[in-house]
Image: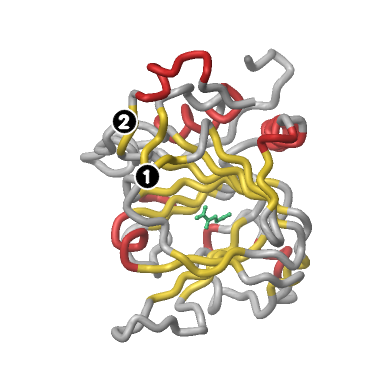
Protein backbone atom coordinates (compact mmCIF):
# COMPACT_ATOMS: atom_id res chain seq x y z
CA UNK A 1 0.00 0.00 0.00
CA UNK A 2 1.41 3.46 -0.87
CA UNK A 3 1.91 5.78 2.12
CA UNK A 4 1.68 9.63 2.04
CA UNK A 5 5.50 9.87 2.06
CA UNK A 6 5.99 7.63 -0.99
CA UNK A 7 7.25 9.47 -4.10
CA UNK A 8 4.59 9.84 -6.79
CA UNK A 9 4.27 7.01 -9.30
CA UNK A 10 6.00 7.60 -12.66
CA UNK A 11 4.10 9.40 -15.39
CA UNK A 12 3.00 6.70 -17.80
CA UNK A 13 2.24 7.32 -21.49
CA UNK A 14 -1.40 7.96 -22.43
CA UNK A 15 -0.93 5.19 -25.02
CA UNK A 16 1.88 2.71 -25.63
CA UNK A 17 2.06 4.14 -29.15
CA UNK A 18 3.98 7.10 -27.66
CA UNK A 19 6.74 4.70 -26.62
CA UNK A 20 6.90 2.42 -29.65
CA UNK A 21 10.40 1.47 -30.79
CA UNK A 22 9.89 2.76 -34.30
CA UNK A 23 12.86 1.03 -35.98
CA UNK A 24 11.68 -2.48 -34.96
CA UNK A 25 9.07 -4.70 -36.61
CA UNK A 26 5.69 -4.60 -34.89
CA UNK A 27 5.61 -4.53 -31.98
CA UNK A 28 7.99 -3.28 -29.32
CA UNK A 29 7.58 -0.59 -26.68
CA UNK A 30 10.08 0.79 -24.15
CA UNK A 31 9.22 2.87 -21.07
CA UNK A 32 12.38 3.94 -19.22
CA UNK A 33 10.72 4.95 -15.93
CA UNK A 34 8.06 2.32 -15.39
CA UNK A 35 8.68 1.90 -11.67
CA UNK A 36 10.28 4.16 -9.04
CA UNK A 37 13.59 3.49 -7.29
CA UNK A 38 11.65 2.65 -4.09
CA UNK A 39 9.49 0.15 -5.96
CA UNK A 40 12.59 -1.36 -7.56
CA UNK A 41 14.21 -1.80 -4.12
CA UNK A 42 11.05 -3.35 -2.66
CA UNK A 43 10.84 -5.92 -5.47
CA UNK A 44 14.56 -6.70 -5.20
CA UNK A 45 14.12 -7.37 -1.46
CA UNK A 46 11.29 -9.82 -2.22
CA UNK A 47 13.42 -11.60 -4.84
CA UNK A 48 16.36 -11.84 -2.43
CA UNK A 49 14.28 -13.10 0.50
CA UNK A 50 12.29 -15.71 -1.47
CA UNK A 51 12.71 -19.23 -0.07
CA UNK A 52 15.94 -20.84 -1.32
CA UNK A 53 13.93 -23.64 -2.96
CA UNK A 54 12.45 -21.05 -5.31
CA UNK A 55 15.78 -20.60 -7.08
CA UNK A 56 16.85 -22.92 -9.86
CA UNK A 57 20.60 -22.65 -10.44
CA UNK A 58 21.44 -22.78 -14.14
CA UNK A 59 24.99 -22.79 -15.51
CA UNK A 60 25.52 -19.03 -15.32
CA UNK A 61 22.31 -17.56 -13.99
CA UNK A 62 19.58 -18.25 -11.42
CA UNK A 63 15.86 -18.44 -12.08
CA UNK A 64 12.64 -18.21 -10.05
CA UNK A 65 9.36 -19.30 -11.62
CA UNK A 66 6.09 -17.82 -10.33
CA UNK A 67 3.56 -19.12 -9.49
CA UNK A 68 4.99 -22.47 -10.69
CA UNK A 69 6.68 -24.33 -13.57
CA UNK A 70 4.64 -25.23 -16.62
CA UNK A 71 3.64 -28.90 -16.98
CA UNK A 72 3.19 -29.98 -20.60
CA UNK A 73 3.00 -26.32 -21.60
CA UNK A 74 0.20 -25.65 -19.10
CA UNK A 75 0.09 -23.72 -15.87
CA UNK A 76 -1.22 -25.72 -12.95
CA UNK A 77 -3.98 -23.58 -11.53
CA UNK A 78 -2.63 -23.57 -8.01
CA UNK A 79 -2.08 -19.98 -6.97
CA UNK A 80 -2.16 -16.52 -8.57
CA UNK A 81 1.02 -14.47 -8.89
CA UNK A 82 2.03 -13.19 -5.45
CA UNK A 83 1.04 -9.62 -4.60
CA UNK A 84 4.61 -8.27 -4.88
CA UNK A 85 4.69 -9.36 -8.53
CA UNK A 86 1.23 -7.89 -9.21
CA UNK A 87 1.61 -4.47 -7.53
CA UNK A 88 2.63 -2.14 -9.01
CA UNK A 89 3.72 -3.89 -12.23
CA UNK A 90 0.61 -5.74 -13.43
CA UNK A 91 -1.88 -3.05 -12.42
CA UNK A 92 0.24 -0.43 -14.21
CA UNK A 93 0.54 -2.63 -17.32
CA UNK A 94 -3.22 -3.04 -17.47
CA UNK A 95 -3.77 0.70 -17.04
CA UNK A 96 -1.98 1.65 -20.29
CA UNK A 97 -3.96 1.62 -23.55
CA UNK A 98 -2.00 -0.18 -26.29
CA UNK A 99 -3.87 1.57 -29.14
CA UNK A 100 -7.24 3.17 -29.83
CA UNK A 101 -8.77 -0.35 -30.08
CA UNK A 102 -6.88 -2.07 -27.28
CA UNK A 103 -7.48 -0.96 -23.65
CA UNK A 104 -4.20 -2.65 -22.72
CA UNK A 105 -1.58 -4.98 -24.17
CA UNK A 106 -3.30 -8.11 -22.71
CA UNK A 107 -6.81 -7.06 -23.80
CA UNK A 108 -7.14 -9.99 -26.24
CA UNK A 109 -5.15 -12.58 -24.28
CA UNK A 110 -7.12 -15.55 -22.85
CA UNK A 111 -6.91 -14.39 -19.24
CA UNK A 112 -6.75 -10.66 -19.93
CA UNK A 113 -3.60 -10.33 -17.82
CA UNK A 114 -0.26 -12.05 -17.24
CA UNK A 115 -0.53 -15.17 -15.07
CA UNK A 116 3.14 -16.16 -15.06
CA UNK A 117 6.44 -14.48 -14.27
CA UNK A 118 10.06 -15.61 -14.58
CA UNK A 119 12.64 -13.90 -12.39
CA UNK A 120 16.09 -14.18 -13.97
CA UNK A 121 19.29 -13.08 -12.26
CA UNK A 122 22.24 -12.24 -14.54
CA UNK A 123 25.58 -11.55 -12.87
CA UNK A 124 28.06 -9.74 -15.15
CA UNK A 125 29.37 -12.03 -17.93
CA UNK A 126 26.19 -14.11 -17.99
CA UNK A 127 23.45 -14.14 -20.61
CA UNK A 128 20.89 -16.31 -22.32
CA UNK A 129 21.24 -18.09 -25.67
CA UNK A 130 19.12 -16.84 -28.57
CA UNK A 131 15.73 -18.54 -28.46
CA UNK A 132 12.01 -18.12 -29.10
CA UNK A 133 9.55 -18.37 -26.23
CA UNK A 134 7.33 -20.87 -28.02
CA UNK A 135 3.61 -21.46 -28.21
CA UNK A 136 2.74 -22.00 -24.55
CA UNK A 137 2.21 -18.26 -24.19
CA UNK A 138 0.07 -15.53 -25.67
CA UNK A 139 2.53 -13.62 -27.90
CA UNK A 140 3.23 -10.72 -25.52
CA UNK A 141 6.21 -10.50 -23.15
CA UNK A 142 6.56 -7.67 -20.63
CA UNK A 143 10.03 -7.36 -19.11
CA UNK A 144 10.84 -5.19 -16.11
CA UNK A 145 14.59 -4.70 -15.54
CA UNK A 146 16.07 -4.16 -12.07
CA UNK A 147 19.54 -3.35 -10.77
CA UNK A 148 21.62 -2.88 -13.91
CA UNK A 149 21.48 -2.24 -17.66
CA UNK A 150 22.20 -4.64 -20.50
CA UNK A 151 21.39 -5.21 -24.17
CA UNK A 152 18.82 -7.68 -25.44
CA UNK A 153 19.74 -8.90 -28.95
CA UNK A 154 17.17 -9.73 -31.62
CA UNK A 155 17.94 -12.24 -34.36
CA UNK A 156 16.18 -13.49 -37.45
CA UNK A 157 16.79 -17.10 -38.43
CA UNK A 158 17.83 -17.54 -42.06
CA UNK A 159 15.70 -19.50 -44.55
CA UNK A 160 17.83 -22.63 -43.93
CA UNK A 161 17.07 -22.33 -40.20
CA UNK A 162 20.63 -21.24 -39.30
CA UNK A 163 21.06 -18.27 -37.03
CA UNK A 164 22.93 -15.22 -38.22
CA UNK A 165 25.57 -14.74 -35.48
CA UNK A 166 25.15 -10.95 -35.62
CA UNK A 167 21.95 -9.60 -34.07
CA UNK A 168 19.70 -7.55 -36.34
CA UNK A 169 18.93 -5.13 -33.50
CA UNK A 170 19.89 -4.39 -29.90
CA UNK A 171 17.58 -3.01 -27.23
CA UNK A 172 19.26 -1.40 -24.22
CA UNK A 173 17.27 -2.06 -21.03
CA UNK A 174 17.87 0.29 -18.11
CA UNK A 175 16.97 -0.47 -14.48
CA UNK A 176 13.28 0.26 -13.74
CA UNK A 177 12.38 0.09 -17.42
CA UNK A 178 9.61 -1.86 -19.09
CA UNK A 179 10.12 -3.53 -22.47
CA UNK A 180 7.12 -5.03 -24.24
CA UNK A 181 7.60 -7.30 -27.26
CA UNK A 182 4.57 -8.68 -29.07
CA UNK A 183 3.17 -9.85 -32.39
CA UNK A 184 5.61 -10.57 -35.25
CA UNK A 185 8.56 -9.66 -33.08
CA UNK A 186 7.52 -12.41 -30.65
CA UNK A 187 6.74 -15.07 -33.24
CA UNK A 188 9.32 -14.49 -36.01
CA UNK A 189 12.48 -13.40 -34.20
CA UNK A 190 14.78 -14.88 -31.59
CA UNK A 191 16.07 -12.99 -28.58
CA UNK A 192 19.15 -13.50 -26.44
CA UNK A 193 21.66 -11.77 -24.16
CA UNK A 194 25.41 -11.95 -24.79
CA UNK A 195 27.43 -13.40 -21.89
CA UNK A 196 29.76 -10.39 -21.59
CA UNK A 197 30.77 -8.06 -18.78
CA UNK A 198 30.37 -4.89 -20.82
CA UNK A 199 28.10 -3.85 -23.69
CA UNK A 200 30.10 -1.86 -26.24
CA UNK A 201 29.56 0.23 -29.34
CA UNK A 202 26.36 1.73 -27.98
CA UNK A 203 25.01 4.70 -29.90
CA UNK A 204 21.90 6.03 -31.59
CA UNK A 205 23.03 4.06 -34.66
CA UNK A 206 23.33 0.69 -32.91
CA UNK A 207 20.65 0.76 -30.19
CA UNK A 208 17.07 0.55 -31.46
CA UNK A 209 15.52 2.36 -28.46
CA UNK A 210 18.22 5.06 -28.04
CA UNK A 211 15.67 7.91 -28.31
CA UNK A 212 13.55 6.37 -25.52
CA UNK A 213 16.37 5.85 -22.98
CA UNK A 214 16.20 7.62 -19.59
CA UNK A 215 19.86 8.62 -19.69
CA UNK A 216 21.54 8.13 -23.06
CA UNK A 217 24.32 10.43 -21.79
CA UNK A 218 25.32 7.64 -19.38
CA UNK A 219 26.33 5.57 -22.41
CA UNK A 220 27.92 8.39 -24.44
CA UNK A 221 31.28 6.59 -24.35
CA UNK A 222 29.49 3.71 -26.07
CA UNK A 223 29.98 1.40 -23.10
CA UNK A 224 27.83 -0.14 -20.39
CA UNK A 225 29.70 -1.96 -17.62
CA UNK A 226 27.25 -4.54 -16.35
CA UNK A 227 26.32 -5.14 -12.73
CA UNK A 228 23.92 -7.83 -11.59
CA UNK A 229 20.63 -7.47 -13.41
CA UNK A 230 17.34 -9.05 -12.35
CA UNK A 231 14.58 -9.31 -14.93
CA UNK A 232 10.89 -10.02 -14.41
CA UNK A 233 9.29 -11.44 -17.57
CA UNK A 234 5.51 -11.51 -17.48
CA UNK A 235 3.42 -13.64 -19.83
CA UNK A 236 -0.09 -15.09 -20.15
CA UNK A 237 0.14 -18.91 -20.29
CA UNK A 238 -2.59 -20.01 -22.69
CA UNK A 239 -3.53 -23.28 -21.00
CA UNK A 240 -4.38 -23.40 -17.32
CA UNK A 241 -5.00 -26.89 -15.94
CA UNK A 242 -7.49 -27.38 -13.11
CA UNK A 243 -5.32 -30.18 -11.70
CA UNK A 244 -3.81 -27.85 -9.08
CA UNK A 245 -7.13 -27.03 -7.43
CA UNK A 246 -8.09 -30.77 -7.40
CA UNK A 247 -4.82 -31.65 -5.66
CA UNK A 248 -5.57 -28.88 -3.18
CA UNK A 249 -3.20 -28.46 -0.24
CA UNK A 250 -0.96 -31.36 -1.42
CA UNK A 251 0.20 -29.19 -4.31
CA UNK A 252 2.11 -26.35 -2.74
CA UNK A 253 5.21 -24.42 -3.70
CA UNK A 254 7.45 -23.12 -0.95
O1 LIG B 1 15.90 -11.52 -18.98
C1 LIG B 1 15.50 -11.14 -20.06
O2 LIG B 1 15.37 -9.94 -20.35
C2 LIG B 1 15.16 -12.14 -21.12
C3 LIG B 1 14.63 -13.41 -20.56
C4 LIG B 1 14.25 -14.36 -21.63
O3 LIG B 1 14.81 -14.39 -22.69
C5 LIG B 1 13.12 -15.25 -21.41
O4 LIG B 1 12.56 -15.30 -20.30
O5 LIG B 1 12.75 -15.96 -22.37
Tell me the residue at 59%/48% (across/down). 177
Choose top left, top right, bottom left or bottom right for residue 102. top left
Left or right position of 163 against 176:
left
Tell me where residue 29 appears, x and y as whole percent: 43, 53
The answer to which of marks 1 and 2 sits earlier in the sequence is: 1
Q: Which of these two is toward me, 194 or 68?
A: 68
Residue under the point 39% across and 46% down: 16
Label 1 environment density (alpha carbons within 10 Å; few <14, some 14–19, many ≥20): some
Image x and y of residue 196, in percent: 71, 72
Which numbered tag is attached to residue 73?
Answer: 1
- Residue 132 placement, left or right of 86: left
The local secondary structure at tag 2 comes to: loop
Q: Is residue 51 left or right of residue 130?
A: right
Answer whether residue 126 is visible to the viewer in this image. yes
Is the residue 239 above or below the residue 192 in the image? above
Please state if 103 lies on the left or on the right of 93 as rendered.
Answer: left
* Residue 210 appears in the figure: no
Along the line of sight, the residue nearer the viewer: 58 or 27? 58
Q: Which mark is residue 111?
A: 2
Query: Which quadrant of the rendered structure holds the C terminus?
Result: top right
Q: Are marks 1 and 2 in contact (CB under 8 Å)?
A: no
Q: CA distance from mark 1 to mark 2?
A: 16 Å
Query: Relative to residue 195, is residue 60 depicted above or below?
Result: above
Element type where label 1 sits in the image: loop
Amino acid sequence: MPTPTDPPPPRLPASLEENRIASLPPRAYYIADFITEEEEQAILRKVETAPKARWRQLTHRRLQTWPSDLVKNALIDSQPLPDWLQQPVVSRLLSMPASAEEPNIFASSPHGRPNHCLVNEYPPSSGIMPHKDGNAYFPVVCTVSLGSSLCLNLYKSKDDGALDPEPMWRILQEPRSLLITAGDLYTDYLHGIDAISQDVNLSELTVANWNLLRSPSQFQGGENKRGTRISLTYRDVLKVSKLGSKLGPLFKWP
